[in-house]
Image (cartoon, helix red, strand yellow):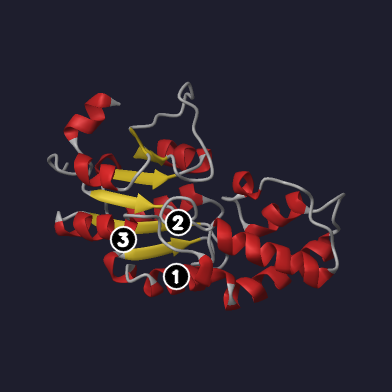
Amino acid sequence: MAGEERRGLPGTLLFDLDGTLLDSLPGIRHSALAAFAACGLQAGDVELRTLIGPPIRGILARMVVGRASEEQLDRLVAAFRESYDSEGWKMTPHYEGAAVTLRNLREQGRRLFVVSNKPRHISVRILEAEGTLRLFEEIVTKDSRQPPYQDKQEMMRYLLQKWKMPREECLMAGDTMEDAEAASEMGMKFCLMTHGYGDVPSDSAVPVAFRFAHFSELIESGTGAMH
């Protein structure tokens, strides 16, 4: 890890949203509870923070007391979307220092992209409201195409092919094992943002080039030469 830091960051950075750039917990909690109330279903006493990352249907399924039918999950997802699209997304700010760091990275000449499971229209709306949308060359989400991307690995492969980016010159910044595994499979370096909702244990076989608790650390590492 120390060796990676001395060499500095690569020239191309891919960012996850929930738990990486965005503190999504307040908005997701608000709209999840609103969905359960609207559908007359009981939410279990779960630590929602540990569930964030996968698509919302999986999160809601794990919140239900007992076993939910597919029809009930359909209703929950629809109610969640209605609440989140109108109110929840407004409760989803950037983490402290994220916006400034993104601007500084662009000033350093680095290329920035988003790879996220979050719906595209909400991702764009939040980034635009936070003033960072223009800093990214492309936003890729699961529903950016039809049929949807299967996973983040497929989204990354699309970006590598479209923009002809050497994978060894790319770094994925995320907060979950899913992010780390996708980066590893695609031959990219991985930066774990430890302020997020997931974790990659220090003894994991999945390589982690950087572990940062604050976005300012990206800038400090970014002062090295680009590759």
Residue 126: image location, x then y, percent: 44, 70
The kind of residue tagged 2 is Leu
**Quadrant in the picture for residue 4:** top left
The numbered mark at residue 149 is none
Q: Which residue is mark 3?
A: 99
Question: Viewed as shown, does residue 29 lie left or right of 117?
Answer: right
**On screen, residue 3 above or below 170:** above
Q: Quadrant of residue 30?
A: bottom right
Name the spot of residue 50 as percent of width and height, x first.
Answer: 61, 44
Task: Classify 10 Å Cα crowding around label 2: few (below 14), some (14-19), many (20 and above).
Answer: many
Q: Position of residue 149 (x, y in %)?
A: 53, 58
- Alpha carbon of mark 3 to alpha carbon of mark 2: how far? 12 Å
Q: Earlier in the sequence, mark 2 or mark 1?
A: 2
Q: Label 2 to label 1, Cα distance in Å?
A: 10 Å
Q: Report the front residue among 151 and 93.
A: 93
Give the class, few, some or many, for how many residues have Cα within 10 Å of label 3's Cα (few <14, many ≥20): some
Residue at 78%, 62% in the rendered image: 73
Residue for point 14% across, 39% down: 224
Amino acid under disc 3: Ala
Question: Is 39 situated left or right of 207 in this image?
Answer: right
Numbered disc 1: secondary structure:
helix
Residue drawn at x 47%, y 67% as measured from the top left: 123
Pick the front one: 46 or 198 = 46
Residue annotated with mark 1: 126
Residue type at mark 1? Ile
In the picture provided, is 159 more to the left or to the right than 66?
left
Q: Earlier in the sequence, mark 3 or mark 2?
A: 2
Mark 3 in CB contact with mark 1 (< 8 angstroms): no
